[in-house]
Image (cartoon, rainbow, N blue to C red):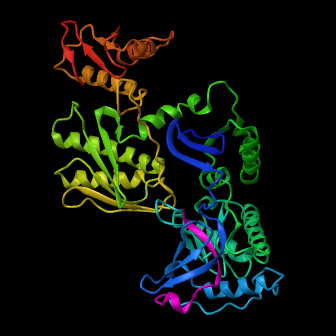
Amino acid sequence: MNKEIIIRSINSAVDFALLHDGKLIELHKEKDNNKFNVGDIFIASIKKTITGLNAAFLNVGYEKDAFLHYHDLGPRVKTLLKYTKLVREGKIKNFSLDKFNFEKEIDKKGSIDDVLSANQTLIVQIIKEPISTKGPRISSELSFAGRFLVLVPFSNRVSVSQKIKSKDERNRLKSLIEEFKPKGFGVIVRTVAQSKKIAELKKDLQNLNNQWVNLCKKIKGAKTPSRILNELNRSSSILRDLFDDKFTGVYSNNKNLCYQVKDYIEQIAPKKKSIVKYYKSDTPIFEHFNIERQIKTAFGRTVSMSKGAYLIIEHTEALHVIDVNSGNRSNKSNNQEETALEVNLIAATEIARQLRLRDMGGIIVIDFIDMVNSENRKKLFDHFKTVMESDKAKHKILPPSKIGLIQMTRQRVRPEMNIRTKEENPNGLGKIEAPIVILDKIQNSLEKILKNSNVTKSKLRLHVHPFIAAYLTKGLISIRFKWLYNYNKWIKIIPRDSYTYLHYRFFNAKGKINNY
């Protein structure tokens, strides 16, 4: 599998596209004016505590107060408060924790009023970006994420990712970390640390410790509220979390950004720095890698799939709803149950992609096509869990309900990626689907006609708007030529002045309309 990251720099924003074998899997956007990213650390002031919610609201500099629940305080929040006060007073100059006396851990079932009070100063970290009408959600349990490790101050615990299945490897990593980790710090070993050498782990831990020292240096003179340590820029953080030996290319249309990415990859994987390449062409980078087209077809309310099936995706404030439809299709399956299973498996794979692509979080309800056979329902459930394993966002999938719905939750840490694909209607008022989608619809219709045994397929003619006709026949290896190669069928294309841009019809030799 070829894995590529395409980075497009335009004006004040940078777009990141993750491709698997040319197929768009993830899409991220970084804006210069976004000052509240997940992982950013702020010095904040407590405005008020709410006993009923067992939470506090803090001023971090955002237009709306940040929300801090008691469970997000961390067991060592009293130690953090004490340490912050001493640093701001200049009484601590050596920022190691080996000789620092920790305070007692807070009660897991305690009250927010027992720990915090108004006007206190507290160091917090963004764990959920502002979404809609809500301010950011924060935590006072700080962590510094690296390539292989996560450093947690005011802890002594070493834990290893559950995704590392080998018991021997887990024990090896745990014993290595316990040998050289600084006292007073906990460490979480990430999945990518598997089989890594001690030198790589030490280097990563040293970088994280340097981040802690830099944070402490900024605490003393920092204004309240203010950001005192920001997360890596999005390109570096994406590479940190996603990059592995399977990546075959990282392309960017910005030379400076290209140098930054190359420098970062040289730090984490020196042997792979050659895959970073500067893209220079008159054709926009997203057009060259066929990303724009995929965006137009993937972000609408309706998402087409293979074999005529499609998804309907609806969003509400409370949850997301996905409906699976088989469409007007025919196949060689013996019965309805087999057809339903086939469509559901295709849909499950596409839904897993859509969740990552749109970064959908919260409650998600999926209405798959009903299946009577319990084995088929289990097969669908197992398949869906398998295709979701590559999703790094925390998620939980429940078995199908009695009425055939699959319910799931997915971690929601930033606003959903929402791209409007509808365009102005050239023929009148209102909005229409992006014209580029018409090509996929025409091809899907052609496939259905060729698969339908009840349809006369002799001398198929396609009637379309002259502009669309010109596009389909353009070049030596035109789209029509590709149809001939794939389906062994020559399609005569008839330009029709009376047709609108999105209007098309297939006719056979007898002049009968084939509507699909």
Residue 390 among magenta residues: no
| Residue 174 percent across, percent down from the top left | 63, 73
Q: Is residue 481 above or below residue 389?
A: above
Res 172 visible: no
Total numbered labels placed on residues in the image: 0
The stretch of residues the image draws in magenta is 108-129
Q: Is residue 445 above or below residue 106?
A: above
Q: Is residue 69 left or right of residue 195?
A: left
| Residue 91 percent across, percent down from the top left | 82, 87
> Foreground residue, 298 or 50?
50
Quadrant position of residue 159: bottom right
Image point 22% across, 43% down: which residue? 340
| Residue 40 percent across, percent down from the top left | 64, 65
Q: Is residue 454 left or right of residue 68?
A: left
Considering the image in quadrants, where does the C terminus appear?
Answer: top left
Q: Is residue 253 above or below residue 72?
A: above
Image point 56% across, 72% down: which residue? 138
| Residue 100 percent across, percent down from the top left | 75, 88
Q: Is residue 45 left or right of residue 403?
A: right
> Foreground residue, 481 or 213?
213
Q: Is residue 166 left or right of residue 421?
A: right
